[in-house]
Image: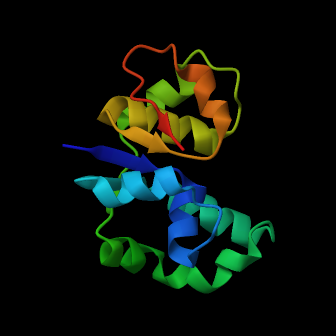
Amino acid sequence: MSRILLDTHAWAWTLTADGRLSASAMAAIEAADDVSISAISLYEIGQKVRLGKWPEMAPHLSELIAAADRQGGRLLPISPQASLMAATMDWAHRDPFDRIVAATALTEGLALISADSVFDEIASLQNWPGRVW
């Protein structure tokens, strides 16, 4: 059984048919038995649209939850375990969205679909399920 977590940009790229989604990422998504999205991705997209940093996602805001459902994605709440892990994990990366996504992947045992190589810095953490790109 293949279980994956989409990083925020990877999920957004599936919604917009963005060509930056790699062939191996797309293959992993199509082959997965379970595709998950962290609830923090909703916040990250909304926040970045509000701040003018991701205007191309503005048309999708009102449909994000429904879009995840249509795609067969499972929206994961931010668990207490992931919250604590994100705050305390030994990782110099300060982006709170990435920290929550990484902690969710770790606590749920989900391989992470992400173009962001910053996640490779935590490959040595116990139980890190890995990054696919």
Q: Position of residue 121 (x, y in %)?
A: 63, 22
Residue closest to the eye, 10 or 89:
10
Residue farthest along the right direction in this orientation? 52
Q: Residue at x 28, y 45 (%)?
A: 3
Counting the numbered discs, the total is 0
Q: Residue at x 60, y 27 (%)?
A: 120
Side of 122 where 65 appears, left or right: left
Q: Position of residue 15 (x, y in %)?
A: 51, 74
Quadrant of the rendered structure where residue 117 is? top right
Q: Residue at x 37, y 79 (%)?
A: 66
Side of 36 where 63 appears, left or right: right
Residue closest to the eye, 47 or 92:
92
Quadrant of the rendered structure where residue 68 is? bottom left
Q: Position of residue 16 (x, y in %)?
A: 58, 77
Side of 21 where 5 appears, left or right: left
Quarter in which the N terminus is drawn: top left
Quarter in which the C terminus is drawn: top right
Q: Position of residue 34 (x, y in %)?
A: 25, 53
